[in-house]
Image: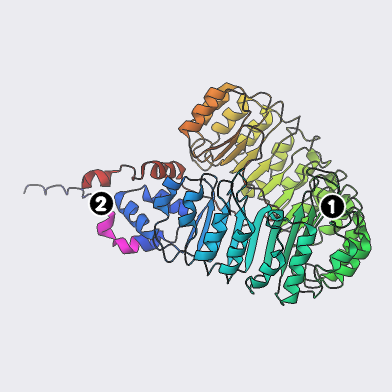
Amino acid sequence: MPPPDPIEPSSPPAMDSALPAAVVATILSHLDVRSLIAASAACRCFHSCASHALTFLPSFHLLEVALTHELLRPLLPPNPSLRSLRLDCNRLEDAAIGFLARPGLHELILLNCDNISGRLLCELGATCQDLRVLSLHSLAERRGLPISFTDLQDLLNGCSQLESLRMALDFSMFDDLNFSHVWASASEALTSLEIEYIPMTMLLELLSVAMEYQQCMHDVKEPDAPIIEPTASSDLTNAGLQQINPKGRLKHVSLMRSQEFLFTSFRRVNDLGILLMAEKCSNLESVCLGGFSRVTDTGFRAIIHSCSGLHKLRVSHGSQLTDLVFHDITATSLYLTHVSLRWCNLLTDVGIERLSFNKDLNVLDLRDCRSLGDEAVRSLSCLPKLRILLLDGTNISDQALKYMGLGTCPLASLSLRGCRKLTNDCIPLLFAGSVKQSLQVLDLSRIPSITDDGIMLLANSQTPLIELRMRENPKIGDASVMALTSMLVDGGTHGNSLQLLDLYDCGGITPLAIRWFKKPYFPRLRWLGVTGSLNRVMVDALVRSRPFLHMACRGEELGTLRWDTSSDWYRHNDDDLDELEQWLLDGEPVSDPETSTEE
């Protein structure tokens, strides 16, 4: 009997025959935008279904890269279901206003709007009547772009459902006789207002109108950075402080005086003003106070003990804040989750030890607290929810990193910038315990004793870092770049986890290091900081070969820095970023066996 014919292996069915296109599109619609675009590069079926999914996505969030109008247009087709839009507008101009102002939007967050004029405000007021949340950063900052009071007026009159407004720009350009009256016609639902700079007289006008028309403002933020010493008529005083929350409705207050241009403070506010304000601040959930040089422990303690629902506390340049502020914090019912105590130089390890009794701490910023040492870190190392810890400029040594390495906190971000007593030995001590599994962001800048040997130890630890900053370290050189290039995490490609690497002004970096940033090395890298004079020709060639890589050559800080950082960290497990670039640049899926068969 002849043997049976061998069974021919059958080729797998095409995706569009295995699943209906509508089912695939529905599945893809549950992905975030980056993952959706990466999936579209898999085959023609996914490309078609992803394009269809873009027409009914409820949210479009793409802050990692700044696209031009031409690249963004196919990603934002007409979509009546779109409710949330978040974009980096660094490469957009007024020509893009038409598809940024979309009917039906409930949330619009736009970063780096330098090249977009105030006409955007007018268009939003005319088109987005259902808008609830609006955040605009650096609008019309390029010289010559027009922005006027009528633009603001059109926005407030048109967006009748607005609940939260954040405008990172100078409000003095809206100074007008009708400034206070235009807010009377603003949305009654507006409860949160954040402004980068507003003169004190305009702020008080705004608040008086809000109280007169019974608008329930919950959030007031007023940071400023004066270039000359404010006069008595334009500066905040004890009396003015009482007008900010006369009816006790505010839930969030931020009064920050930056010392970016001038070493100054709120000199006309003392403990009395804070004590009187605290009487009507029992509903506060977050307090940010910066530059109150005459406020002592008495004033700060009044805030802590009066606000039983306080979750976020930020004090900067608290020149008279000491350990006594937290002496009896255990006697309160506070559940602080975010605490920032920057430039509080009288604070010592004892105060941080008392603060650590608050086990709900999630974010702790202790930058430039010069009197803090190893024992402060020891008391923090076992906090069960601590995710972000900033220790820049403190007096810690390698012993502090040993405490942290042996601790149990699920640390995701650690900044050690300017901790000059640290050495290479701190690297293995830090990654000796569970921190290795959770840490994703690490800053080792301005630590003169860190060398290439320390970075090699870091690479050997196989820690899946997403951001690594090593700027202004004289002993970091090409060997560190090669060590990071050879770093394999979970069997991935070379240097596969890093999305941000800052090597600005590292003394040992030569043009040889630039070659290691070409593909296929560092496939996920989106931010790279180097010294611009390193080799301009090679740097420019790298920019051309990797158009979605943000190159910083003048010492600017990389990435998006926020004090109130979310602890929800998202990581892509698939090596998809090159496919993202392929889709955006070519508009077609990459070739695959299925596509070849169809052709």
Amino acid beneath label 2: Pro
Residue found 42% across the figure and 46% down from its top = 70
The residue to which callout 2 is attached is 12
Which residue is nearer to you in this view: 557 or 489? 557
Amino acid beneath label 1: Gly
**Extent of the magenta region:** 15-24
Q: Nearer the viewer, mark 2 or mark 1?
A: 1
Horizontal and vertical percent for residue 104?
48, 67
Mark identifier at residue 88: none
Give the Cα distance between marks 2 and 1: 67 Å
**Visible residue check, residue 288:** no
Q: Please, what is the dominant secondary structure of the magenta stretch? A: helix
Q: Secondary structure at mark 1?
A: loop
| Category of crowding for the residue at label 1, using alpha-carbon neighbours closer than 10 angstroms: few (below 14), some (14–19), many (at least 20) | many
Horizontal and vertical percent for residue 49?
34, 57
Residue found 34% across the figure and 45% down from its top = 589
The residue to which callout 1 is attached is 291
**Of the image marks 2 and 1, the number of the one nearer the N terminus:** 2
